[in-house]
Image (spheres, rainbow, N blue to C red):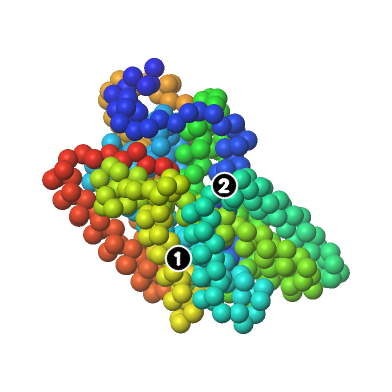
């Protein structure tokens, strides 16, 4: 059996294993619902306005292909070694302790910045619903809401996570159906068709497409959830099917919905000061539908923000317990809440107040680029880890038939994954609008890796049994 292979056994012995209890349907819903959010509903406005309708579709297709490369790599390891803190466990075992240490902090910082992104996105949506309302007020209100819920009882939001995911998917399906009807003349009587494409599918050329490489990929940020949840499926033989179905549904939902938005909304009218999905209904003279979409997008942003608030607090607490973060954060209050870790994680959300003095769209996109830098780093490490895992697995006598899920073509898939993220890095550095966020991100994570290397040399191989982000 594959579990007797030394590298697999070592990961399972040094990490906290997960019980396989999920159904395929639940895994697909968790993967798709947990990934789709403001990266699609809000950030797509920047992609369409910068790259044009055709450029937007191409970039989301490319993003889907790249995320497929990474997710299948993680899927193979998750199926073979279903452990909590999988990203950190795999990078520690197959790249090195210092890299595992670094991935833990990259995961936490990226998650904390995602809280900021969701809070700022929520404030942008509220400004669209209530024009001229102050951005800082909504940022404070939503930050206080997330903090309060997590200090008292996270189940308030946790119990509706499944339904929130369902609502998002239902909205996408409804939008596709209604949008297709509008393209054919439903409502106005004028068939729009693909006239926006014929008027200029690629108005800004390759430069415009390169300028949105991080923003378009942000729609798929968090896709590692797909592989992690697949590793918990009750029937091990259905893991591959669950991963493939989830990716197909996810990429299909994103690309089809973007194609319809781009067909109905002139690219010059798109931006990130409001959801392009809302603009479509508003332009069609359907304010009630536009309001409903805004509420769904707001709900999506807040539930995502709540998840990352919950996860980040416990991630920092876990790292502190295993001496990968200051021991100060290893304490909990009388309710069992890691309050100190929660407070520090929530401080990132307050960075969004800068939006009041700069511009909410500028701050939001900077955060997206910063998170993009973290994803490039983390997802590249996932591909490298899978490459080294398979190499060791075979060298230690492992049988490929024992792997419940395998990448489509090894070593081509992990190599293409690393190359794709390298290209993404180079293109984002060439574009001035994305460069600053990437540079700040790189300085942050390179610094952490240097400190992690020094720490491991002094203290040895410390392994934290962390939760997945």
Q: In this view, does 373 lie above or below 361?
A: above
Residue 268 lies left or right of residue 388; in this view the side is: right
* Residue 375 picture quarter: bottom left
| Residue that appears at 47% across and 39% down | 228
| Residue that appears at 30% across and 43% down | 321
Residue 390 lies left or right of residue 29; in this view the side is: left
Residue at label 2? 155
For label 1, the SS is: helix
| Circles 2 and 1: CB atoms closer than 8 Å | no
Residue 94 shows in the view:
yes
Q: Which of 12 and 440 is in front in this view?
A: 12
| Residue that appears at 67% across and 66% down | 294
Residue 232, numbered circle:
none
Residue at label 1? 349
| Residue that appears at 49% across and 79% down | 356
- Screen quadrant of the N terminus: top left
- List x then y, in percent, for residue 392: 28, 29
């Amino acid at each position: 059996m594959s579990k007797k292979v030394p590298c697999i056994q070592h990961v399972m012995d040094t990490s906290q294993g997960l019980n396989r209890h999920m159904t395929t349907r639940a895994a697909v819903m968790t993967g798709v619902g947990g990934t789709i959010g403001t990266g699609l509903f809000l950030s797509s406005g920047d992609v369409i306005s910068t790259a044009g309708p055709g450029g937007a579709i191409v970039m989301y297709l490319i993003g889907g292909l790249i995320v497929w490369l990474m997710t299948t790599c993680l899927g193979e390891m998750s199926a073979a070694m279903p452990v909590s803190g999988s990203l950190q466990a795999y990078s520690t075992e197959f790249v090195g302790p210092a890299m595992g240490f670094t991935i833990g902090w990259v995961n936490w910082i990226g998650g904390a910045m995602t809280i900021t992104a969701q809070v700022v996105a929520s404030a942008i949506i509220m400004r669209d619903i209530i024009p001229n309302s102050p951005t800082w007020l909504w940022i404070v209100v939503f930050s206080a809401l997330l903090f309060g819920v997590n200090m008292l009882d996270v189940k308030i939001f946790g119990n509706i996570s499944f339904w929130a995911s369902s609502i998002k998917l239902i909205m996408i399906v409804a939008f596709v159906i209604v949008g297709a009807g509008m393209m054919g003349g439903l409502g106005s009587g004028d068939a729009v068709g693909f006239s926006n494409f014929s008027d200029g599918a690629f108005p800004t050329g390759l430069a415009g497409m390169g300028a949105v490489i991080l923003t378009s990929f942000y729609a798929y940020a968090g896709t590692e959830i797909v592989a992690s949840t697949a590793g918990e499926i009750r029937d091990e033989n259905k893991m591959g099917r669950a991963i493939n179905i989830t990716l197909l549904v996810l990429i299909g939902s994103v690309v089809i919905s973007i194609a319809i938005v781009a067909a109905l909304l002139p690219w010059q009218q798109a931006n990130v000061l409001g959801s392009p999905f809302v603009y479509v209904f508003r332009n069609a003279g359907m304010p009630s539908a536009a309001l409903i979409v805004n509420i769904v997008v707001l709900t999506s942003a807040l539930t995502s923000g709540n998840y990352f608030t919950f996860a980040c607090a416990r991630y920092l607490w876990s790292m502190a317990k295993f001496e990968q973060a200051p021991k100060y954060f290893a304490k909990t209050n009388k309710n069992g809440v890691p309050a100190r870790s929660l407070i520090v994680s929530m401080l990132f959300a307050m960075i969004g107040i800068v939006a009041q003095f700069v511009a909410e769209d500028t701050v939001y996109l900077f955060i997206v680029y910063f998170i993009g830098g973290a994803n490039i780093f983390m997802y590249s490490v996932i591909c490298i880890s899978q490459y080294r895992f398979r190499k060791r697995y075979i060298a230690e006598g492992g049988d490929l038939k024992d792997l419940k899920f395998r990448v489509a073509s090894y070593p081509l898939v992990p190599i293409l994954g690393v190359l794709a993220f390298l290209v993404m890095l180079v293109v984002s550095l060439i574009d001035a609008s994305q460069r600053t966020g990437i540079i700040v991100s790189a300085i942050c994570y390179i610094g952490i890796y240097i400190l992690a290397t020094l720490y491991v040399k002094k203290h040895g191989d410390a392994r934290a049994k962390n939760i997945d982000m």
